Image (cartoon, rainbow, N blue to C red):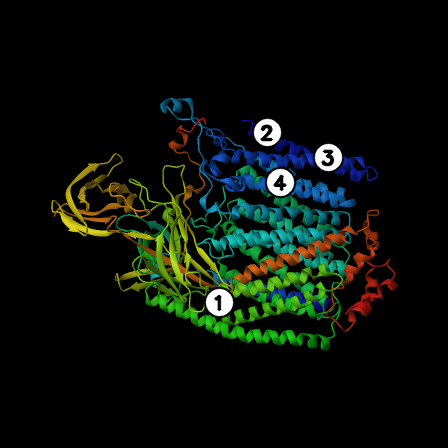
């Protein structure tokens, strides 16, 4: 019987140890844009998506990339180039997190954040039930 | 509104009757000789259950019935259904919200309760009172957070101001388009059945602990545990397939917290099933099985609390989505009751188990030998409990973070993939060798001899895997390179990309896990085959289930590691583009014809483009016209998320086209919305220009202020058609102020103008569009698409080649068949339990099993051990007192009949 328990504890101990290693090695830190510019390894940044005329969301059809600007908590802006299909909730999202790294872009001559994954923010109005005036308007089919 | 009133009445009935049911059964426990309290309990339970079902039906009626202006005063109907919602989706809308899903849980619980008291025999009074408490809690929650809440509506003053308005909305917001999918009609009901059935092991475990009867609970609970394993497993599979079919949901399993919340109870129940086999066979592991029975239900309560409370389904403190699943918020009172359930059932279970801990009989769980089937079962339980703990930890991590006052964020799939890898390897290895192990002790020579052939077949497979992996890695790298060269992928990603583990280690683990999975599938199918031909074919169930898991492992690890994606643009007038050996060419646009001004015709519902694909040489069948090509038609759908509010929240859903082959799937979706590219022309004011068959004249312009601020600039454009007709159009640009503070600016909206006077063919719109206007030099740039000068489509595609992913689905189905067979077998065995006086305490050991149930305890399905060790050893089981009353003599004749 004791042998069984020893083996069981070994399995459990090994699995837990391995879990702790996976845990610590899978955490990618969130950094601000300034730190991201200085870091060479993949990081995560997050901020609000700018959508005005100076910072337009552009679909680069040649590269199938999505280019947009984000501004982090310290008011620093950077252009993100996301290589991937535009996330479904992107147009309505106020902000997003992006995983990637900063590199120099030869075409535009500035540093961009090359990203391989985005986690977009859910629009806050997702769950609110609000009633548009049109919903109350009696239509011709009313009363049928 | 009578439905709401009726619903409230039924909920209160359910609540009161459930409490009375507990009382009636309690009475019968105090007076076990009388039959009346039991009958009273059954009658009260029936009323309680029917009340819950009736409430569900009433909510369904509220959601389903189509009347204008009437039922949208119910907030639930307003939020989840609309007049144009069709057929099955109207039914599915019933469970698409918080309250509806509680009712679904309650309804299944109510139905399962009938099964429980029908089958419980003498255990009825012990189990039912606890079971009914689930309905008590659920009806309380639904009374606190009523599904029949009404919208406040417009006041008389508002109505006076707006003649023609109804006091309540005449249409609903409708079902979220991403839920308008056939899976919505079958996935929630199936998975909620699995959840509801978790209450049964819990109640039986409680009864076993209170009345100190650990022997009889085993055969009674086996079929239920397997039922949960089956239905919850199928529900998980459905969810996975739905995620796979939906682009943007990260494949069939993303370790999403809400997915995990359904998965960790499944792991606990599967561990329970394995522990019960040990307990049935040897009497040991009683402490573990009772604990796991309690744990399964409690983990489900934890998961459902995490999901519904918003801890997982909402946003992290910094606003990002923690999970791709999102649910409505639960009311505070509902939340308090959910916590009460967690604490109540948790404390009940824990206190009972701890109190009875010493008195739970400890028997030898396994033989002395490590090389035995008993030990394998024991290890199986350990592995699954550890896996359950890891997944539970990972899923609750966001909550832990918020308790520590840090910003919550979900753990990435990387964590789970890494943590689960060694466990999966050991599991696959154990599954691969257990069919060759005997109970108690396996003769090691015999074992090695028997394993020789399967082992060599596995090595051959391993070699094949080695080449396959090298090839797949090479293809993956090639894809990266091609994409990087085209500028589509970041050039450095191949190195910087965070593979979830060192690439070399990843390759080795794919080979290893796939080979071990293959061994598991092979060994178990050999044993299953033998058992099918024996006297007890149903005993093959467990082995068949393992075959399924082996296949599932192979499919999952190969497709996830080596799937490759290419993104490219297919232009209407461009040539075919090649990816993975397939050539893609534009065929036609099949969406709805565009609507006229003022809607932006780029946003349209259920658009689709047809792409003609030529498969690589040697593949595909030639049809009647001699062509090997086929059509793929992915679709995209843009909708306004918030139809009820005045602000637009546009979302898109993309439905990929999945073409299934035996060895891979070709997954074709959109990388971005297809673009209709129009012709461009720059005109100077007053100077007509002829382009093709048309003559354009930019006659004048006009600037107007807009009510909401900003202005509208329009151009007067005259087009002379080939037949001499002159058409005047006014394309315009709207400049509206947008943004605040630093990001304030003017948003430009270009309004496409339809040109109905120049009729078009189906689906090719005639539009004119003002691109820019320069006031200084009087120039303006226009874009147009006219019948004889059409615009062209540019379709950005994202094509993924997923190798061997269909093994995942095949594996799950095989596993389901196996679990089903096992469930039927154990249900038939449970029928043979003799219904003598209730066993309590010390006399539990003397429970009389009938011949046939004992026979099953001997596990005659062990036909692979020809050394006869089993026959000799089975007599040793007399020592544990379980089979004390069956004469040993009757068992001996069985040994020679084993092949």
Dot 2 or dot 1: first in sequence order is: 2
User: Callout 1: few (<14), some (14-19), or many (20+) C-alpha neighbours within 10 Å?
Assistant: some
Identify the residue shown where x is 61% and y is 62%.
Answer: B548
Residues beneath discs 3 and 1 located on the same chain: yes
Does dot 4 land on a helix, a strand or a loop? helix
Check disc 3 and report the residue beneath it.
Answer: B43
User: Callout 3: few (<14), some (14-19), or many (20+) C-alpha neighbours within 10 Å?
Assistant: some
Do residues under tags 4 and 1 come within 8 Å of each other at their CB atoms?
no
Do residues under tags 2 and 4 come within 8 Å of each other at their CB atoms?
no
Dot 3 or dot 2: first in sequence order is: 2
Check disc 4 and report the residue beneath it.
Answer: B107
Spatial CA distance of label 3 from label 4 is 17 Å
- In the drawing, what numbered circle is on residue B501? 1
The percent position of residue B743, horizontal first and vertical second, equals 29, 47
Do residues under tags 3 and 1 come within 8 Å of each other at their CB atoms?
no
Subunit ID for the residue under disc 2: B
Subunit ID for the residue under disc 1: B
Dot 3 or dot 1: first in sequence order is: 3
Check disc 2 and report the residue beneath it.
Answer: B6
* Side of B261 where A101 appears, left or right: left
Residue found at the very far front of the displayed protein: B624
């Amino acid at each position: 019987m004791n042998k069984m328990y020893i083996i069981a504890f070994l399995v459990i101990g090994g699995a837990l140890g391995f879990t702790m290693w996976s845990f610590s090695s899978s955490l990618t830190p969130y950094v601000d844009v300034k730190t991201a510019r200085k870091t060479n390894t993949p990081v995560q940044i997050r901020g609000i998506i700018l959508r005005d005329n100076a910072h337009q969301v552009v679909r680069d059809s040649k590269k199938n990339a999505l280019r947009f600007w984000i501004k982090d908590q310290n008011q620093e802006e950077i252009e993100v180039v996301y290589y991937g299909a535009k996330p479904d909730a992107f147009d309505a999202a106020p902000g997003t997190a992006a995983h990637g790294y900063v590199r120099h872009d030869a075409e535009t001559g500035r540093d961009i954040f090359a990203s391989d994954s985005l986690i977009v923010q859910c629009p806050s109005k997702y769950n609110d039930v609000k009633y548009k005036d049109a919903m109350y308007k009696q239509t011709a089919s009313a009363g049928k | 509104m009578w439905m709401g009133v009726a619903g409230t009445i039924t909920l209160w009935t359910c609540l009161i009757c459930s409490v009375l049911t507990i009382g009636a059964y309690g009475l019968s426990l105090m007076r076990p000789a009388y039959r009346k309290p039991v009958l009273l309990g059954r009658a009260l339970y029936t009323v309680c259950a029917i009340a819950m079902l009736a409430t569900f039906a009433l909510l369904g009626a509220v959601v389903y019935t189509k009347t204008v202006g009437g039922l949208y005063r119910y907030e639930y109907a307003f939020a989840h259904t609309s007049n144009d919602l069709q057929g099955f989706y109207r039914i599915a809308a019933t469970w698409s919200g918080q309250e509806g899903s509680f009712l679904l849980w309650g309804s299944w619980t109510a139905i399962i309760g009938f099964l429980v008291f029908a089958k419980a025999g003498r255990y009825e009074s012990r189990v039912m009172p606890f079971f009914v408490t689930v309905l008590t809690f659920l009806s309380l929650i639904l009374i606190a957070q009523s599904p029949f809440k009404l919208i406040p509506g417009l006041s008389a003053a508002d109505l006076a101001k707006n003649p023609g308005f109804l006091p309540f909305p005449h249409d609903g917001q409708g079902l979220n388009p991403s839920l308008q999918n056939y899976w919505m009609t079958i996935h929630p009901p199936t998975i909620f059945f699995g959840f509801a059935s978790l209450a049964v092991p819990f109640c039986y475990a409680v009864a076993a602990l209170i009345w100190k009867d650990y022997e009889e609970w085993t055969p009674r609970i086996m079929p239920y545990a397997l039922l949960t394993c089956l239905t919850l497993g199928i529900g998980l599979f459905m969810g996975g397939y739905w995620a796979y079919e939906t682009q943007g949901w990260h494949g069939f399993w993303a370790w999403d917290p809400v997915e995990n919340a359904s998965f960790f109870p499944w792991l606990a129940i599967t561990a329970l099933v394995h522990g019960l086999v040990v307990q049935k066979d040897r009497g040991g592991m009683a402490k573990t099985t009772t604990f796991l029975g309690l744990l399964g239900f409690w983990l489900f309560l934890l998961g459902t609390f995490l999901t519904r409370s918003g801890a997982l389904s909402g946003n992290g403190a910094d606003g990002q989505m923690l999970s791709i699943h999102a649910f409505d918020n639960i009311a505070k009172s509902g939340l308090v009751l959910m916590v009460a359930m967690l604490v109540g059932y948790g404390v009940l279970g824990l206190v009972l188990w701890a109190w009875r801990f010493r008195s739970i009989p400890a028997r030898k769980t396994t033989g002395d030998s490590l090389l035995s089937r008993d030990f394998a079962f024991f290890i199986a339980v350990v592995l699954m409990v550890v896996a359950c703990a890891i997944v539970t930890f990972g899923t609750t991590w966001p909550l832990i973070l918020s308790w520590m006052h840090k910003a919550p964020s979900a753990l990435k799939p990387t964590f789970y993939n890494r943590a689960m890898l060694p466990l999966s390897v050991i599991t696959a290895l154990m599954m691969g060798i257990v069919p060759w192990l005997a109970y108690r002790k396996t003769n090691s020579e015999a074992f090695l001899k028997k394993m020789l052939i399967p082992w060599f077949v596995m090595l051959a497979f391993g070699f094949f895997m080695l080449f396959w992996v090298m090839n797949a890695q090479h293809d993956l790298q090639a894809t990266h390179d091609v994409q990087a060269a085209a500028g589509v992928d970041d050039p450095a990603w191949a190195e910087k990309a965070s593979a979830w583990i060192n690439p070399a280690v990843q390759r080795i683990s794919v080979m290893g896990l796939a080979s071990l999975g293959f061994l598991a599938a092979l060994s178990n199918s050999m044993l299953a085959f033998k058992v099918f031909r024996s006297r007890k074919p149903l005993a093959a169930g467990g082995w068949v289930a393992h075959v399924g898991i082996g296949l599932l492992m192979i499919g999952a690890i190969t497709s996830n590691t080596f799937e490759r994606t290419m993104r490219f643009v297919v232009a209407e007038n461009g040539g075919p583009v090649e990816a993975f050996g397939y050539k893609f060419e534009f065929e036609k646009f099949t969406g709805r014809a565009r609507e006229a001004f003022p809607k932006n015709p780029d946003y349209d519902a259920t658009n689709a483009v047809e792409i003609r694909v030529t498969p690589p040489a040697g593949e595909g069948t030639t049809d009647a016209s001699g062509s090997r090509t086929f059509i793929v038609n992915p679709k995209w759908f843009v909708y306004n998320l918030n139809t009820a509010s005045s602000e637009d929240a546009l979302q898109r859903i993309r439905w990929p086209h999945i073409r299934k082959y035996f060895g891979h799937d070709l997954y074709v979706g959109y990388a971005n919305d297809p673009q209709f590219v129009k012709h461009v022309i720059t005109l100077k004011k007053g100077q007509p220009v002829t382009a093709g068959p048309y003559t354009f004249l930019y006659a004048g312009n006009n600037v107007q202020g807009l009510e909401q601020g900003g202005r509208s600039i329009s151009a007067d454009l005259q087009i002379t058609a080939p037949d001499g007709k002159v058409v005047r159009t006014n394309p315009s640009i709207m400049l509206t102020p947008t943004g605040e503070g630093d990001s304030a600016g003017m948003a430009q909206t270009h309004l496409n103008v339809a040109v109905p006077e120049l009729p078009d063919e189906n689906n090719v719109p005639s539009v004119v569009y003002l691109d820019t206007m320069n006031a200084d030099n009087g120039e303006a740039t226009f874009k147009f698409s006219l019948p004889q000068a059409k615009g062209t489509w540019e379709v950005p595609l994202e094509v993924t080649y997923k190798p061997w992913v269909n093994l995942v689905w095949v594996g799950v189905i095989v596993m389901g068949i196996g679990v089903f067979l096992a469930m039927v077998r154990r249900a038939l065995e449970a029928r043979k339990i003799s219904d003598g006086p209730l066993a309590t305490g010390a006399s539990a050991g003397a429970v009389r099993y009938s011949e046939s149930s004992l026979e099953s305890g001997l596990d005659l399905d062990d036909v692979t051990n020809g050394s006869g060790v089993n026959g000799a050893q089975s007599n040793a089981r007399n020592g544990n007192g379980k089979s004390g009353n069956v004469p040993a003599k009757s068992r001996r004749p069985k040994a020679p009949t084993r092949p």
